[in-house]
Amino acid sequence: MIAANTNPLFQIEQNYSQSIWMDNLSRTIIESGELKGLIVEKGIRGITSNPAIFEKAIAGNAIYDQGIEASLRANKSVMEIYESLVFDDIRRACDIFKPVYETTNGLDGYVSIEVPPTIAKDTETTITEAIRYYQAIGRENLMLKIPGTPEGLPAVERVISEGINVNVTLLFSVQSYIDTAWAYIRGLEARVAEGKEISKIASVASFFLSRIDTKIDGMIEKKLQERTDEPSRTEQLQYLKGKIAIANAKIAYQEYKQIIQSQRWQALSAKGASVQRLLWASTSTKNPEYSDVMYVDELVGANTVNTLPPNTIEACADHCSPANRIETGVEEAQQLIASLNDDDININLEQVMEQLLEEGIDKFVKPFESLMFSLEAKVKQLATV
């Protein structure tokens, strides 16, 4: 075990006020004690889940069979069985993280669960399900994940106004982050207008990274194949590879700083409101040519969260090099983003972000539907035993 004072994961929190959460949850890591160990040995301060994670955790895993059989005896539907399994995992994870929640005064110690991705474009159903999930799970350190779609943001506002913690997910563009931040503020303002407490509400804005570079890099590769007779253009295109996501995130952080300096935010802060922290998501490096901790090292900064999959946690503990880099190279970041509009490059970033959002929803819908199918098959199998 790496000593806490030399472990980069601990240094990131202690020296730079960034929290490290993990993007992975299963009954196996809960029951084995691994999750508790990650809190103590790796300094993990929260955990997130999504339909893809639960599909991997539940499908084909016998550890859930007893719970499925109990639900069968209670004549539960496949959806009710899914919820009973997942809600139980979430409650147990919340209990494990409760000491972190208490010692950080509600800054960390959260467990995120996503409302069904099939309702991402249905505002009213998202509101209803988020409230139902929160009440059914019954843990104060629970965060409801709601996609940052045009339909999702009004739901974020309403759910915040109900006093529920929200993790706004699938944010790609800087504008989508700005819209998310103001949805959070409006939700808090609505509570204040009703004379309700706002100091116990927490929110994060999950800003995605590696998917952006994967998409942009693919577009750059196509452009490089189209024309190779202009060395300067080739060099310019090559230079952009693997840089857009981090540049985009740095610009978003500057917007965050402006928002918390606004009069509307200051009025809420005076009443005890907590800032909605930017959370760096999709932080596993997809391209083996890039550093496996590039989305950690380059985005260390105050009042942020970085949520890492297990492999990236191990890599970071081994060779992250923490420094306060979130506010370095901001001007270059702005130039990089602006250069996408150059005639020689001609990449419409707004269009790319819209496409990534649609793909992001689909990447959660498909495993959710696959999980429902797998559960249904397992239910039939166990029903005949």
Image (cartoon, helix red, strand yellow):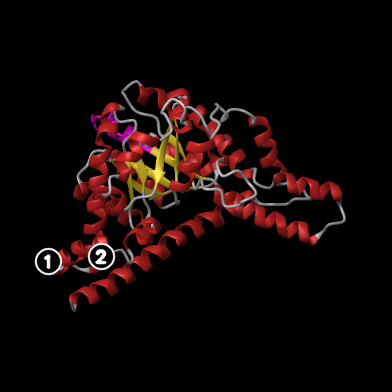
Extreme-right residue of the structure: 229
| C-alpha gap between disc 2 and disc 1 | 13 Å
Crowd band around label 2 with a 10 angstrom C-alpha radius: few (<14), some (14–19), many (20+): few
From the viewer's perspective, is residue 118 above or below residue 290? below
Left or right of 137? Residue 312 is right
For the residue marked with disc 2, what is the amino acid?
Met
Magenta region includes residue 129: no
Locate residue 67, reporting x and y percent: 19, 61
Q: Look at the image and give the residue range highlighted in magenta.
A: 188-203
Residue drawn where x is 35% and y is 28% of the image: 274
**Label 1 residue SS:** loop
Extreme-top residue of the structure: 270
Nearer to us: label 2 or label 1: 1
Magenta region includes residue 194: yes
The residue where tag 1 is placed is 74
The residue where tag 2 is placed is 79
